[in-house]
Amino acid sequence: MEAAPAALPPEPLGRLFLRYLRFGLLAWGGPVAQIGLIRQELVEEKRWVAPDHFNRVLAVYQVLPGPEAHEMCVYFGMLSRGRLGGVLAGLGFMLPGFIFMLALSIVYVGGITSPLVQAFFLGVQPAVVALVVRAVHRIGGHALRDPWLAGLAVAAGLAHLGGTTFWLTLPLSGAVYLLVASRRRAAAGIALLLLGAALAAGSLAGRLDERADSAAQGRPPDGLTTDRPALVAHAPGADRDRGGGAAGSTSGASPGRLFVAGLRSGLLTFGGAYTVLPFLRHDAVVRGRWMTDEEFLDGVALSGMLPAPFIIFSTFVGYLGGGLAGALLLTAGIFLPAFGITLVGHQALERLINHRRTHTVLDGVTAGVVGLIAATALTLAREALTTPAAAAIFALALGLLYRWKARGAIAVIVLASGVLGLLIG
């Protein structure tokens, strides 16, 4: 990797922190807009970073897990003032979103009993499903470049719906595609058969374990309810019932579990921030049961309305699992890889991802993740699209997401969907 450009100034730490804090306050419109904002200042206006250098750094973080806009802030902060500068730049970029999301989480948990607020969120939830569906198409359009990758995505998605752990599907997806790229088609075919057998076995085992766990605790499998629960006030981490007798209660999570859930999700976010959805939902809704799918959708919606990396909705998930400490722990866990990969191993990882086999394995893993997101979208749609009005809001929001590319469009669409929920409700 080439040395840092000589023009990159060693800024005072306070000024460096404020620069990246400003980036965080203006981080509307998702990663593309956020990266464009960083590029405009560092490359085009200040001319501190050469365009080819910027593009190469972006390519590294598009392959590696984590929110690439945040990782690039850490990287350029490190070029200016070493590892301390990288830490301050990363904290500055994520801090506004964290504070906003934490405040909204406190308000959400503190007392959503108003029928108007409930109607607003019931309108927002179909729009969130539309966001996830759009993300599947956008990520899949880049990741699923051939029939083998598409097949791996389908297999991983079906396995996820069947209850197979992603710890099995994702490594197998990478291994199968490595065989395909090595022109070992016969071996890849055998591996696919083994993959199918393993997924079937894992699915059966997962379902049996889930049913046993549900029967022991007297609740439906997979955290699902027989009636759609209504939003009511509750305390984070406390047992709560969102809709009377039909809804199963949820409970808080231990500090260690919250941190590990964030760390695991942060290490698996290949291909964009939306790839974190199936992993966090698995920990918070399916296994941990400290929140419901409706609450999960509400958290994603709140994140979409903020100037922040999309992954900041992890703060909401952590707050519902363990209050302020839970929000801090899960957020720290999910951002830790983004800091660590950059501050400790950027150069080694840049050399590693230039190896063709590494790219190939990551391509297979990313295809598997696309399948997981698609399966998660189906599950969330089953929970959110329960009325003709919700289906209509979903269709309208999805159409707007495909046609409207302006910065801040996601926030406007989510807010407008909430207003439609108020009008219809």
Image: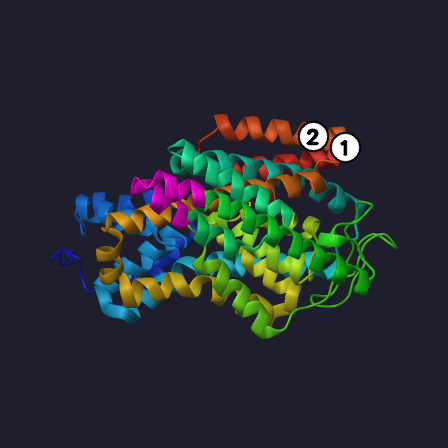
Q: Is residue 305 visible?
A: no
Residue 53 horizontal/vertical position (percent): 19, 49
Query: Which label was assigned to residue 312?
Result: none
CB contact under 8 Å: marks 2 and 1: yes
Residue 117 horizontal/vertical position (percent): 74, 46
Look at mark 2 in the image and give the residue it sits on.
Answer: 391
Left or right: 261 as drawn, with respect to 223: left
User: Where 91 falls versus 309 (above or below)?
Assistant: below
Look at mark 1 in the image and give the residue it sits on.
Answer: 387
> Neighbour class for label 1 at 10 Å: few (<14), some, many (≥20)?
few
Left or right: 388 as drawn, with respect to 268: right
Q: CA distance from mark 2 to mark 1?
A: 6 Å
Residue 138 horizontal/vertical position (percent): 45, 35
What SS does tag 1 mark? Answer: loop
Q: Which of the 4 quarters of the picture holds residue 51?
A: top left
| Residue at the (13%, 55%) spot, across then down | 2
Q: Which residues are magenta?
A: 174-190
What SS does tag 2 mark? Answer: helix
Q: Which of the 4 quarters of the picture holds residue 387?
A: top right
Residue 277 horizontal/vertical position (percent): 55, 50
Quarter holding the N terminus is bottom left
